[in-house]
Image (cartoon, rainbow, N blue to C red):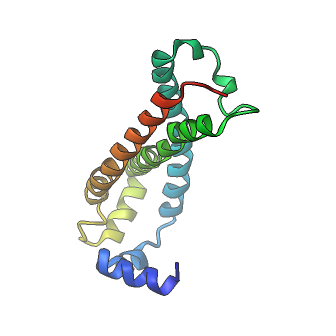
Amino acid sequence: MDPRAFKLLMDRWRPGWRERSARQKSSWNPTCLVLGFGLAAVFWYWLFHAAWALHVELYPAHAGLLREFWGEGISGAAFVSSFLMLMPLGVPALVLGALAANFLIWLIPSARRSMEAEAAGDPEMTFRGVTIWMLKWGGLASVGCVILSIIGLATLSSLR
């Protein structure tokens, strides 16, 4: 997408985003970003293993065959189902990682003061505002993605 078109879309979708972005100068912002992505990887791992456990409940013959997931010689149908089982879980993992990182950074008094100063009274930039926004939109996206994952795990009748 053309960067100018993206900015125009963002201006329409999220008025004031440029000003909010320009105020984010604290060194805690990149720290929160890195921590969020790191935690997202952990959450994705856990979510996949939870999905696999549910899959094994539906297909007990697959118990103990996790190492064969995306194994050599996988069919197209099995790949599509396993892809649906795994990949959509990245969205709730990112949401959980961002929420957890935001909370952990908020627990550090100097980081909290720095972030509150950046917010400068803008309710969308406060800890509460960001958390509500992530729960609202991230939760909505996560529900859809979990449904896709359930479809994938339910239709993965063969690992080959």
Depth check, front residue: 118 or 59: 59
3 w.r.t. 61: above or below: below
47 w.r.t. 21: above or below: above
Is 50 left, or right, of 62 in this rendering? left
**From this viewpoint, is residue 61 visible?**
yes
Q: Residue at x 65, y 19 (%)?
A: 65
Q: Residue at x 45, y 84 (%)?
A: 5
Q: Residue at x 60, y 34 (%)?
A: 78
Residue furthest toward the right? 72
Depth check, front residue: 41 or 154: 154
Count of residue discs: 0
4 w.r.t. 75: above or below: below
Residue furthest toward the bottom? 4
Depth check, front residue: 158 or 64: 158
Q: Residue at x 48, y 42 (%)?
A: 89
Residue 124 horizontal/vertical position (percent): 27, 66
Residue 86: quadrant of the picture: top right
Residue 58 horizontal/vertical position (percent): 45, 18
Residue 85 horizontal/vertical position (percent): 51, 36
Residue 120 horizontal/vertical position (percent): 28, 72
**From this viewpoint, is residue 14 visible?**
no
Query: The C terminus appears in which quarter of the rendering?
Result: top right
65 w.r.t. 117: above or below: above
Is 153 left, or right, of 109 in this rendering? right
